[in-house]
Image (tube, grey):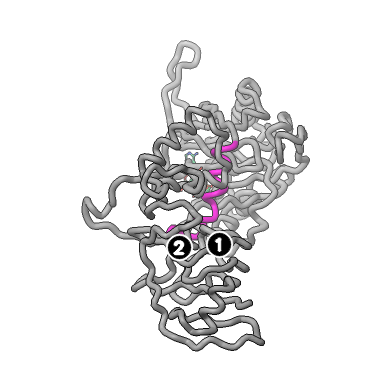
Amino acid sequence: MSIIDIKVPNIGDFKDVEIIEILVKNGQEISKGDSIITLESDKSSVEVPSDNSGKISNINVKVGDKVSEGDLILKIELSKKEDIKIDNQEIINTREFNEPNEKPLEKKEIKTNIHNTNKTAKLTQASPKVRKFARELGADINIISGSEKYGRVSEEDVKSFIKQGINEKQPLKSNEENQKQKIKIEYDHSDFGDIDVKDIPRIKKLAAPHLVNSFNTIPHVTHHDEIDITEMEEFRKSLTDHYTGEKLKITPLAFIMKALVAALKEFPSFNSSIEDMTSGKIIFKKYFHIGIAVDTPNGLMVPKIRQVDKKNIQHLSAELREVAQKCRDLKIDKKEFYGGSMTISSLGGIGGSFFTPIINYPEVAILGVSKSNVKQILLGDQFTTRTILPISLSYDHRIIDGAEAARFCNEIRDNLGKNFAFKLAI
Ligand code: CAO
């Protein structure tokens, strides 16, 4: 029996083209002309057909891989018929034998060009356009019955399949499948003017599935509040170095970290994680490592400031600057991103009033901080000028109730305001 390599054929000027679909499985018998993978360039998707019949013995690629001409796709154990053809050198395609005792094949020119084939024999017949359409809607083309000649699937067949699925309330797709799904745009951006196409930065690519997972699986609720930090700000701005007498560069964030940790001690469910709701277990953390969202040119990173409860504000402020710089210089170890209690996402240095931060799974809450503003507030019967800090707390509603979240925010408010908990830690 002969095993041959099936490689990516000539695909014109394209290089590093993404595999968006693998249409065969290990052990599957396929016929010559059956499509084996689908490649997608910027403009179109095309299927690569097999030039031989036989049994798939080893798939060397996966969805998402980028391939160029000559890259190994898979190996096929040739069917007897095909073997005979090869021995008689009747076929034109260049393939090499892998088994050492076999007689090597004479190399000839590759004649197979990538093309939009409909030859999917045992697989479903459909054009690449229809396949793409089905894929974008999350439908498996192989289980759709085609209404056209020879059972070929049309766009209308895909639409009716989806409608039927909706009516039958099919189970929701897994999160992984959701992530692969793309939102269909019926036009090309370049139809409307010049465009630039650039790579998505690596950090954003790495963070994306994490964000999608959190957004799709955690029932988020965001609680907004305003905190009067007038006294805290006066105090912060009055801080000077013991020796030089110079003003200390400490931002409100160090105070907020301390206030948050003091609140976490009172409300342990905010310092918890659930791995799997079905296990029925909650992990309560006894440490206080606060994640800080850091804006970098490469994307958002969330390093942890460890043991915030044991450090003073000056220490925290210095560590924050150092860690943020390490992130921006890409000199931070990935372990620094693990093992947090809760995250603070501060846009206070940039602007805005409120926002809805996404929980940094496996944490159960995140505190969004916006820019403080000086406002006229009615205190008693007098309008007074006060500095007001907007906060936005997103929490996992499976673990935390709305009332608890409101009390937690009150606790933070008191720690930054009337309780002056931050003062104790200077
Ligand atoms: N209200 C008013 N002013 C504030 C403030 C607030 N809540 N927070 C910070 N500031 C001031 C600081 O005091 C500082 O003022 P000076 O220049 O006069 O000293 C200025 O804003 C800049 O602060 P900073 O942003 O450099 O420092 P920070 O400690 O507040 O934040 C860091 C550090 C790393 C969190 C920040 O640089 C950063 O990257 N923020 C963006 C985070 C982000 O992108 N979050 C969104 C994620 S999506 O959920």
Is the residue 392 above or below the residue 55 in the image?
above
Q: Callout 1: helix, strand or loop?
A: loop
Residue at x-position 42% and y-position 79% = 110
- Disc 1 to disc 2, C-alpha distance: 10 Å
Relative to 214, say whether 37 is above or below.
below
In the image, what residue type sits under mark 1?
Answer: Lys
User: N-terminal of the two: label 1 or label 2?
Assistant: 2
**Residue that mark 2 sits on:** 18
Q: Position of residue 167 (x, y in %)?
A: 48, 27
SS state under label 2: strand
Q: Verify whether residue 227 appears in magenta.
A: no
Of 140 and 250, the residue lying toward us: 140
Instruction: Give the image quarter of residue 160.
Output: top left
Looking at the image, is 343 positioned above or below residue 388?
Answer: below
Residue 205 painted magenta: yes
Q: Which residues are magenta?
A: 199-217
* Type of amino acid under label 2: Glu
Q: Main secondary structure of the magenta part?
A: helix
Which one is in front, 13 or 245?
A: 13
Q: Is residue 96 left or right of residue 422?
A: left
Mark 1 CB in 8 Å range of ligand 1?
no
User: Which quarter of the image is occupied by the N terminus?
Assistant: bottom right
The local crowd at label 1, few if under 14, some if 14 to 19, many if 20 or more residues have their Cα within 10 Å, is some
Instruction: Decide which of 44, 282 is in the foreground and name it.
Output: 44
Residue 299 visible in the shown view: yes
- Give the class, few, some or many, for how many residues have Cα within 10 Å of label 2's Cα (few <14, many ≥20): some
Labelled disc at residue 62: 1
